[in-house]
Image: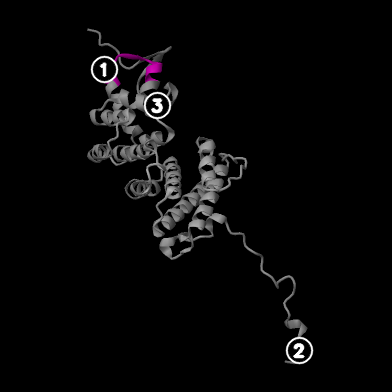
């Protein structure tokens, strides 16, 4: 065509190149169950695990429990952890915080699927599964921690040498499964069967089961005060039911109770408790009046 020159066909510098898009390191892999096979590689799994741990350190305030123990575990796998300052989540960005946690949960799912698809059953698999389960429990994401717990206890622990997995750590996760069965699923028969199967004799777990089956609210809250953060998260599934039981028992058994006693058996102070449950109780100093004696 006469009006078109060779120069006019050349792309301008403004449009000649597309900007490179930044890909989140946690999103560069797809789900192995959807056809992405890259996470079947053991080295890729370990590198991806390192990235998940580093990201988790930055965004979640509950990582204080990781401490030097996690660094030592990472060092045993020849994986270097960069100590970057934690960026605490502020209330002004709840949506961004939730999106980041969802991204981390999805990344942990990808890693678990990769290890299952590659039939990996070694010390790294146990460590990675343990990390994922604990984080998912803190997030109360049942879809992540429950199947992972079953895989860890039924598939990984039996295949990995007892010199790698300490008996105390094995029983720790048995306890989490029992609490999930009892508190979230209300499957008491399953909880007792699991306790007997693994011969768990932890007094705190036994106290929770006894408290829930027999309605011993005081024993439940006593066990909850001494539980670790993961056990507390699992016990939170039944907090409301146990508080309702506590209210009924107190109103039937007592005329007055001490304010400190209320905190012991509900895990809440007076102002928080009365604001939430709207009980018609009265406060006189440190004494709570639950009901008045009938005058005849």
Question: Residues under labels 2 and 3: Cα distance?
Answer: 85 Å
Q: Secondary structure at mark 2?
A: loop
Query: x, y percentage for residue 213?
Result: 24, 31
Question: Is 80 rendered above or below residue 257?
Answer: below
Which mark is first along the chain, 1 or 3?
A: 3
Disc assigned to residue 3: 2
Query: x, y percentage for residue 51?
Result: 55, 50
- Asked whether residue 128 is drawn in magenta, I would say no
Which mark is first along the chain, 3 or 2?
A: 2
Query: x, y percentage for residue 260?
Result: 40, 17
Question: Residues under labels 1 and 2: Cα distance?
Answer: 99 Å
Residue with the mark numbered 3: 226
Question: Is 106 rendered above or below residue 296?
Answer: below
Please provide the residue range marked out in magenta.
250-262
Q: Main secondary structure of the magenta part?
A: helix
Quadrant assignment for the C terminus: top left
At 27% from the left and 22% from the top, the residue drawn is: 249
* Viewer-side residue, 280 vs 132: 132
Residue 287 shows in the view? yes
* Relative side of 228 to 256, left or right: right
* Viewer-side residue, 107 vs 67: 67
- Asked whether residue 260 is drawn in magenta, I would say yes
Residue with the mark numbered 1: 253
* Viewer-side residue, 214 vs 39: 39
* Relative side of 191 to 107, left or right: left
């Amino acid at each position: 065509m006469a009006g078109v020159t060779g120069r006019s066909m050349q792309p301008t510098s403004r449009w000649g190149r597309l900007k490179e898009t930044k890909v989140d390191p946690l999103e560069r892999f797809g789900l192995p169950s959807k056809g992405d096979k890259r996470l079947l590689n053991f080295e890729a799994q370990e590198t991806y695990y390192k990235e998940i741990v580093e990201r988790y350190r930055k965004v979640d305030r509950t990582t204080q429990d990781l401490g030097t123990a996690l660094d030592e575990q990472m060092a045993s796998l020849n994986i270097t952890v960069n100590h970057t300052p934690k960026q605490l989540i502020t209330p002004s960005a709840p949506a961004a915080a939730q999106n980041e946690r969802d991204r981390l949960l999805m990344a942990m799912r990808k890693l678990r699927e990769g290890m299952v698809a590659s039939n990996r059953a070694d010390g790294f698999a146990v460590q990675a599964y343990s990390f994922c389960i604990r984080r998912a429990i803190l997030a109360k994401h049942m879809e992540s921690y429950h199947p992972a717990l079953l895989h860890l206890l039924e598939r990984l622990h039996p295949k990995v040498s007892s010199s790698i997995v300490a008996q105390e750590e094995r029983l720790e996760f048995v306890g989490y499964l029992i609490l999930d069965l009892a508190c979230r699923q209300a499957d008491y028969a399953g909880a007792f069967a699991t306790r007997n199967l693994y011969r768990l004799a932890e007094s705190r777990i036994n106290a929770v089961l006894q408290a829930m089956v027999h309605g011993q609210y005081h024993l439940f809250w006593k066990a909850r005060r001494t539980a670790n953060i993961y056990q507390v998260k699992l016990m939170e599934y039944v907090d409301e039911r146990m508080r309702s039981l506590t209210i009924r028992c107190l109103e039937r058994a007592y005329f007055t109770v001490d304010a400190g006693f209320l905190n012991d058996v509900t895990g809440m102070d007076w102002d928080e408790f009365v604001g939430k449950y709207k009980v018609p109780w009265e406060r006189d100093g440190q004494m709570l009046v639950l009901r008045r004696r009938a005058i005849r």
